[in-house]
Amino acid sequence: MRYTFTIPGPCVAKERPRVGKYGNVYTPSATKAYEKKVSQMALLAKVPELSGPLRVRIVAHFTDKSKKPVAVAPMITGADVDNMAKAVLDGLKGCFNDRQVYRLEATKLIGKGQDFTDVEIEEYERDDDSVL
């Protein structure tokens, strides 16, 4: 089974935990808010609790604010793509544990239009010969 949904707005990279002035460790508010948004979008898309191996594809689209004419191109500036993927996966912890992901594809693109992130989750099926 395959589940897809879109997260509106710019993709937020997972930030490192912070230590407060009294020694308490906390997750930065921007990260927590984005993970909650991911969770809400998955809920709206009716992504159930998943128990088997999963393939996850994440494509973050960012708006090119320059005046150069660009269709869509790979983005090599900004936050690390692996930290963006981690924020999305952590936002999906109500659906599955990220240890279940056997294949992860994460992409950052820049172009004209709106900021959004597409997420596709696919359950592994025994007769699937596209595992590799």
Image (cartoon, grey):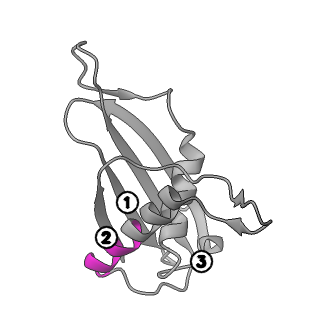
Q: Main secondary structure of the magenta part?
A: helix
Q: Is residue 68 above or below residue 40?
A: above
Q: Secondary structure at mark 3?
A: loop
C-beta proximity under 8 Å, tags 2 and 1: yes
Q: Does the magenta run of residues contain 40?
A: yes
Q: Is residue 132 above or below residue 3?
A: above
Q: Earlier in the sequence, mark 2 or mark 1?
A: 2
Q: Amino acid at mark 3?
A: Asn
- Residue positioned 22% across, 41% down in the render: 114
Q: Amino acid at mark 1?
A: Val
Residue 44 visible? The answer is yes
Find residue 89 and report its horizontal and vertical position in percent.
53, 65
Find residue 60 and report its horizontal and vertical position in percent.
38, 45
Q: Is residue 9 above or below residue 41?
A: above
Q: Which residue is mark 3?
A: 97
Q: CA distance from mark 3 to mark 1?
A: 16 Å
Disc 3 crowd rating (10 Å Cα; few below 14, some 14-19, many 20+) is: some
Residue at the limit of the structure toward the front, as seen here: 22
Q: Quadrant of residue 122?
A: bottom left
Q: Which residue is mark 1?
A: 119
Report the mark closest to the observer, 2 or 1: 2
Stretch of the chain drawn in magenta: 38-46
Q: Which mark is residue 41?
A: 2
Find residue 131 and report its horizontal and vertical position in percent.
55, 62
For the C terminus, give its image quadrant.
bottom right
Count of number-bearing discs? 3
Q: CA distance from mark 2 to mark 1?
A: 10 Å
Q: Earlier in the sequence, mark 3 or mark 2?
A: 2
Q: Earlier in the sequence, mark 3 or mark 1?
A: 3
